[in-house]
Image: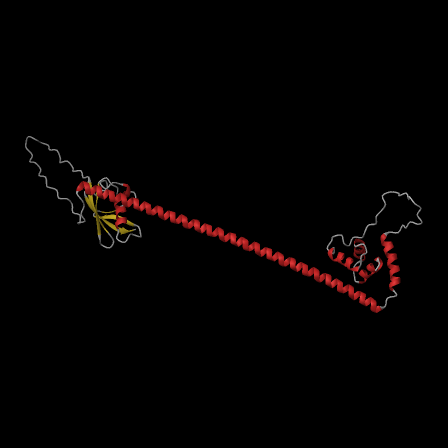
Amino acid sequence: MSQCSTLESLLEMGFPQTRAEKAVSATGNQGIESAMDWLMEHEDDPDIDEPVAPVEPIGPVEPTAPVESVSTETPSEQAEQEMDTESEERQGLTEEQREKQTKRMMELIAQKQQEREDREKRERIEQEKQRRKQGQELIAIKQKLQEQEMQKAVEERRREKQEERLARERVREKIARDKAERARRYGGETSDPISPPAETPVQAPALSPSSPTQEPPTKKEYDQCRIQVRLLDGTALSQTFRAREQLAAVRLYVELNWPGGTEEPFNLLTSFPRRVFTEEDMEKPLQELGLVPSAVLIVAKK
């Protein structure tokens, strides 16, 4: 099949003149199938429909040998002439042969389109596989980071609990040492209800006429005091404290010795005279708060 027959076949199948000429020229007139392959591959080129510019000679060329004749026709004009010639040759084909040739060409076009669709489908499937694979990898990385964060939070909470437990143990040890020290100094302690220590009445000496004034008796200083704390269920706790200890020591003693442990905040107060101790009072010594030599405190919910 010559160039003109290939070009004519492409035109009969509905391809534009410019595209058909480009396909025949680009494939070197290797047949209708090669031309169709080129058209299918380059149908989306932006310049597919631009006419082929004729090649102009750069300068005069001196012939080195005698030339019988030089054609001044352009490639398009030559293709038209060849097409006319080939058309005359093809006029000898029967209608049935032309229909078979056209049917064969259409089958080739359908085959090429199907191959292209199958190739694009395979590419889309492969791209979807890659996208899903990347999504699964991202999910796995996110889950791993979440697990690491959770493990870090668990370790942090465990360390905090350990520090709290050690702090409570240090407080208990300090209270135990204080108890042992007070027991060693004052001969132990009892849990009997607190009663103010009995004081021997001091009789005022009779005034003599010769002594118009008399010095008042000196106030006794106490180094310790007995504190009884009445809990919400009616039970009581008793403990001896130094007069210079802060009220916070009494509250800590109640928290550590509360039966079953306390779960909610509470206040300490006295019934007579009624007084509710504040957070500022917790930093004051017992003797400054008037709780020496003995006192009864009542626990109340905040």
User: Does the rendering let one see residue 292?
Assistant: no
Q: Nearer the viewer, residue 262 or 173?
A: 173
For residue 259, side relative to residue 34 (left or right): left
Q: Nearer the viewer, residue 221 or 119?
A: 119
Kindly give the residue lying farthest to the front in the view shown. 65
The answer to whether 117 is drawn above or below residue 242 in the figure is below
Tell me how many marks there are.
0
Q: Identify the colour scheme used.
A: secondary structure
User: Residue 40: percent from the left, percent from the top?
Assistant: 74, 58
Q: Quadrant of residue 222?
A: top left
User: Residue 168: percent from the left, percent from the top?
Assistant: 31, 46
For residue 278, side relative to residue 75 (left or right): left
Q: Nearer the viewer, residue 189 or 112?
A: 112
User: Residue 153: percent from the left, percent from the top?
Assistant: 42, 49
At 86% from the left and 63% from the top, the residue drawn is 90
For residue 89, side relative to residue 173 (left or right): right
Kindly give the residue lying farthest to the bottom in the view shown. 96
User: Residue 2: percent from the left, percent from the top?
Assistant: 84, 58
Q: Nearer the viewer, residue 17 or 172?
A: 172
